[in-house]
Amino acid sequence: MKRDDSLWKAILEDVFDDFLRFFFEKADEIFDFSRPFEFLDKELEQLFPVNSDDFSPKYVDKLVKVFTKAGEEQWVLVHVEVQGSSDRAFAKRMFQYFYRIYDKYDHPIIAFAILTDRNKSFQPRYFEEKFMGTSLRYDFNRYKILEQNELELAKSNNPFAMVVLTALTALKSGKISESELLEQKIGVLKRLVSNNFGRAKIEALMGFLKLYVRFGNPENDIKFDSSLEQLLDKPNKTMGIVEFVLDRERRIGEKRGEKRGEKKGEKKAREQKLTFVRNLITSTDFDNAKIAALADVAVEVVQKLRLELN
């Protein structure tokens, strides 16, 4: 069972208004939701150039420009920690993000650290530096998934609560059997369908639930898909998340191609593309034609890989 932490990048964009409402009780009085959010991924990459292991991240970051009801610009930095063990440099890294962003834009910043690790003792709350009479302390908002109450999340009518509930379910993987995990995921699915979130958000949340934590046994994916179809009375759709995964796979090939030469890059990109096809075969109910179109390969390639997997 594997989880795909990079999917946080996509789901945060899909439910960012709910993210703000989840953490701020009076969000509708503070923020102007009639004005669109601006996701500043490129600007963030300029301040923090990507590393060679960018596509196997230890953390995920989002920088979002929002507007208050007073008409003022506000910067919201969402730093999602997805490292499975404690990182002594985490609080310092949060501070580095703050001062570089503040130095460039000179705007107020709301910083969040969402911790998805399994280490109960990993509790970063602030960065502090002291030396010979000079001191500095930087505090940030911290939210640890492991500490959340499953029943309280299930009662919430906020879509972001379903994201947290999915992440909480993922933390149980490895500690419970696959059949128990299947029951957990179907339970989250039922709660999701029972809420009137709107079709677009339901599809995004379903994609996150389906792909964030993967089963080791493909038969459980089939059972989950069957439950999804029964609840919706129609085939499921996870295109938003799938498109995100596809874009990431393409960028993997491009980045490695730049570093290892065009020829090697093309070979590696094809390997990544074939891996992507295999993931779609085992994790979705898409037919061969749809998978071929998504991965930009011939239908025969999909047919061959499906036979190999069977």
Image (cartoon, helix red, strand yellow):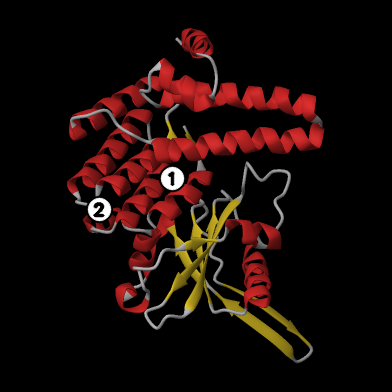
Judged left or right of residue 88, residue 32 is: left
Q: Amino acid at mark 1?
A: Leu
Q: Quadrant of the C terminus?
A: top left
Where does the image place residue 253, in percent across and percent down from the top left?
67, 32
Mark 1 vs mark 2: in front: 2
Q: Are marks 1 and 2 in contact (CB under 8 Å)?
A: no
Image point (19%, 51%), residue name:
196
Q: Can residue 174 be seen at all in this image of the molecule?
A: no
Report the Cα–Cα distance between label 1 and label 2: 16 Å
Q: Which residue is mark 1?
A: 171
Q: Indicate whether 33 appears above or below 139.
A: above
Classify 10 Å Cα crowding around label 2: few (below 14), some (14-19), many (20 and above).
some
Q: Quadrant of residue 210?
A: top left
Image point (49%, 60%), residue name:
114
Q: Can residue 72 be seen at all in this image of the molecule?
A: yes
Image point (68%, 62%), residue name:
89
Q: Which residue is mark 2?
A: 154
